[in-house]
Amino acid sequence: MAKTQKRYVCQACGSVASRWQGQCADCSEWNTLLEDAGGAVTPFRAKHDLQSGGRSVELVALDAEVELPARMPSGIAEFDRALGGGFVEGSATLIGGDPGIGKSTLLLQAAARMALAGQSVAYISGEEAADQVRLRARRLGLGTAPVMLAAATSTRDILTTLSQGKPPVMLVIDSIQTMHSDLIEGAPGTVSQVRASAQELIRFAKQRGTAVVLVGHVTKDGSIAGPRVLEHMVDTVLAFEGERSHQYRILRAVKNRFGGTDEIGVFAMQAEGLAEVANPSALFLTQRDEGVTGTTVFPALEGTRPVLVEIQALVVRLASGATPRRAVVGWDSGRLAMILAVLEARCGLSFSSCEVYLNVAGGYRVQDPAADLAVAAALVSALSERPVPIDAVAFGEVALSGEVRPVAHGALRLKEAGKLGFERALVPAAVASEKSALRLAGFRTLAQFVDHMMGRG
């Protein structure tokens, strides 16, 4: 059994001594050491007890008045929208996306515009030579921007260089998977190297007030490569989405400690780089002068921004005995199966002998549950060969009981539809009571909606 040890605690300063003495060695008070009446202290516990021997941490009240961190605009309004207003001093931002989606182009444009505005910006590339980055800047028309440029992969060399003199306001690391820390062994890109390099860069950001932006590779399933803890370490995680075959790009906030995660920035890839899209609805709507069966316009909502997209459906009847196919692009396939089941069980429509194809125009991906009614409208229109009026939009959530449930921000969706020239809306009954410049048709159940679509009164 380990021999217990006595300990004596000073009643004036709280210091601990292994034996009694008349004067405290820390505060010099006399006769303040008393034997601790607590549990027995073994030599192991005395060595590993974390309740003493540390440095006191300053505690502040939650309601204390402190100055909020200043925002630094990037010079790109859509970028600032996704960030919640701009970069924050001492913050760490991680941006990920597929290869060739435009991550380096976007950050180079933001770095150049901030440098042209008088900010000190450093761009460190671990994948390209400095001349390659310089050639891209010239192609984008930003060759004269005073951006500090370097090609390096050693985290120690980068931080040593930036610590000499005044640190930059913004630091771009392209990419974190190419960085190497000599504190641990391992090749660049491994889990331990990504974690160690990111930790050193984030520590530099917090200590020196530099906004650090890390570019992250993604795996084939779209998640950021490397340890999951990397996303926990940074303050903001941005996902750059889009198909290289399509023109548009969407910058979506996945995590943001300084703002909301429901905002997006929309860009269009052009010859001179990424251009901001002030009206995203124009990208996802097909220009048509007459109604087409199987198409419905849906006012999706991304944060506080409504985006009108076109949902297209095609229903093909098959001969008896053939296995029908279900194909979905831009929407959840499980959600489509649910809508088809509700249409069959609650509305008496048969899709069991039909192939169903559903597509969201423009390559946009819809995650809003309010798209249920618009999808149902497209399916019923394709099945009955009755076109939805070209001046109408539809939105609402469909329950398994067949009820059409209201969704959030109905007035905002209707307002955006009115701006683009739409005159009527097919909405849940609870939304139909709202004031709007559009003619509203409300439905309590999906069966009522199908009767309206089929012209049954």
Image (cartoon, grey):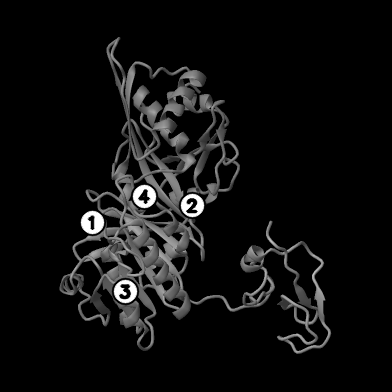
Residue at position x 68%, y 75% from top? 64
Compared across the picture, whether 109 is left or right of 301 comes to left
Give the residue at mark 4.
223
Bin the neighbour count of mark 1 within 10 Å (Cα to Cα): few under 14, some 14-19, many 20 and up: few
- Image depth: mark 3 or mark 4 in front: 4
In the structure shown, which secondary structural element does the residue marked by tag 4 occupy? loop
Please provide percent x and percent y for residue 427.
52, 38
Query: Residue type at mark 1?
Result: Gly
Q: Along the polypeptide, which appears first: circle 2 or circle 4?
A: 4
- The circle on residue 111 is 3
Give the residue at mark 2.
415
Bin the neighbour count of mark 3 within 10 Å (Cα to Cα): few under 14, some 14-19, many 20 and up: many
Residue at position x 49%, y 40% from top? 370
Instruction: Measure how far apart labels 3 and 4 are at the Cα level.
Output: 25 Å
Please provide percent x and percent y for residue 329.
32, 37
Bin the neighbour count of mark 4 within 10 Å (Cα to Cα): few under 14, some 14-19, many 20 and up: some
- Image depth: mark 2 or mark 4 in front: 4
Query: Residue type at mark 4?
Result: Ser
Of all residues, the one furthest to the top in this rendering is 320
Instruction: Measure how far apart labels 3 and 1 are at the Cα level.
Output: 19 Å
Instruction: Measure how far apart labels 1 and 4 are at the Cα level.
Output: 16 Å
